[in-house]
Amino acid sequence: MKLIQDIRSHLLWKMLCWFVLLLLLPCLLFAGIYFAVNMSYFQEERAALERSALARSCANIEQDMAFCAGVSKQIQQHSNFRRFLNGGYSSVSYQLEAYFKEFSDMFLYAESSSPYIERVTVYAAKEELLNMNNYVKGISDLAEYAFDLDTAAGYWRYEPETDQLVYRKTIYSLSGDTGLGILEITCSASLLSQPLGEFSSSISRQVLLSYNGRFYHIGSSGLSAAPEASAPEDAPLSQQLHTMPLTVMAGDYLPKDKGNSLNLLSLTAFAGLAVVFLCSLLFFFSISRLSRRIVGFSRHISSSSAAVPDSYVDEGRDELSKLVRDFNRMLERNSDLINQIQLEKLRQNEMAYRVLQAQIDPHFLYNALESVRMMAEMQDEPEISDVIFSLSKLMRYSFSVNTSQVTVESELDLTGEYLKIQKIRLDDQLDFSIHCPPELHACPCSQFILQPLVENAIKYGRSQGHGALRVDIRVYKEQDRLAAAVENNGASIDPAKMARINELLQEGRDLSELSSGTGVGLDSINSRMRYLYPKSFAMKLSRPAEGGTLVQLSWRPEERTCKEGQS
């Protein structure tokens, strides 16, 4: 018990040391270096991203402004409208007809071309032109105007009183030398506040606009004037628009987001430490659980060392559980081997007893049988004499042969003597025949492979009230194989049972599971012949068409010779 506890303590201490050296210290060192190195990099990367976001926002604003200003090109290129602004109508009715017929839909389309455009107005230089639905007005309605270079090129301005953006551009005559009026496109301030508001929320900074020396805040409701004190002295981020004298500036971080980069890195470091801590707990829990399972398994083996241990139960699904399953299977095989050893001991004791019984001098039996045979002849009893002679020949064959391999002729002679004895006993209830070509008499075969089959044929073929029994024995050549067949016309074996016997014989297994006395002889023949001829021997039971049972054996005689030569 103390040894097991020492092993467990040593295992846990070793795992702790390896955990600290290989996992915990490298993780902490990496986290410190990561925090130190990436702090400045993170700030520089964030500043670069903010500058890129500011540039994209300003580019989007200028793109929207260019689109709105592009409406002026469509009106500027409308030659009939420029003729309309040039005047020269003989009556008001002609002027109205020309406007509603050709130009009224043009203004509606221009206002709907962009969500930011609120109004499109042309201020005509010809005062005699009538006002047309607030789309065409006289130049006097424009408070301040000038046909100067800025107006000729087109310019944007911000109207703080109405919180609107205004684009103005001069419309020239077809000859290009006379200004016919000024086109004014009025846009909502959301053209600026919407993208800049999204930019402000994305970088969490206060965004201001500088226009004509004044500063404006970006809010949810649009632009609002900011006091001079709120203007940053040195804005870290600024961008000048090309389309109008307006500068976008990003000041300090919003109060709720101050130190955001530091907080993010700190949160990352804290999360990393938390993950390391949780992994450590999981690691120690797994190691401790594995240690308890190993110690429990070793304790089970140690406590059962004096005897055969019982099976061990482990509910895991890893390598240790596989080891336990293999251990349990080994115990089952060991139990089977122990049972087989005990059975073999019993068989050995039984065989020793039978050997003691069989230690009677064979020559004494031969002489005794010969004396009885002579007495039968002297008493003129030829049948008794023939039976004793055949029995003596059988016993001499059994005791005198020192090898399990004999010739086909010897095996047939033995079987014939046995059949003679049975014929005298059964008289007309038994008939038999033996057929074998003379050239096969000298072929080698195993001892006692036909007599047990004939004995089974007589014993079980006469059951179930059958009449006279006939047994036919044939030895013949089948291609390169030597074959022997024992056939009787008596009782047949059940087809299902016969199929099971053939299956077991083919697999080389014993027939003990079948409650039939035929299993002893068939098992003996099958096991001996399979040992001598493992590659070629085959044994099969079948039912002839006339009824009865047919047992067929086949093997290659030369296989035994090759095997004996190798051994």
Image (cartoon, rainbow, N blue to C red):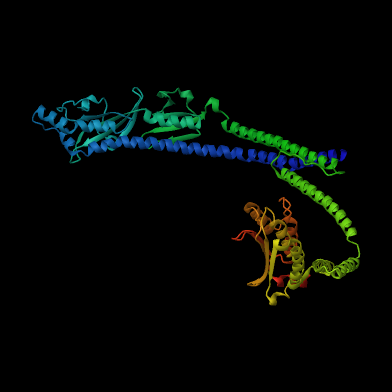
Residue 544, horizontal then vertical, whole percent:
61, 61
Q: Is residue 341 left or right of residue 451?
A: right
- Kindly identify the residue that appears in the image at 73 percent across and 57 percent down: 459
- Side of 493 relative to 82 (left or right): right
Q: Is residue 445 visible?
A: no
Residue 460 drawn at (x, y percent): 70, 56
Tell me residue 400's x, y (percent): 84, 69
Q: Quadrant of residue 246?
A: top left
Instruction: Locate residue 554 relative to residue 41 in the image: left or right.
Output: right
Whether 316 is drawn above or below 357: the answer is above
Image quarter in which the N terminus is found: top right
Question: In this orientation, which residue lies closer to the viewer: 465 or 490?
Answer: 465
Q: Please, which residue is most extreme toward the bottom here? A: 439
Viewer-side residue, 390 vs 59: 390
Is residue 232 at least partly visible in the picture? yes
Q: Is residue 296 left or right of residue 230?
A: right
Q: How many marks?
A: 0
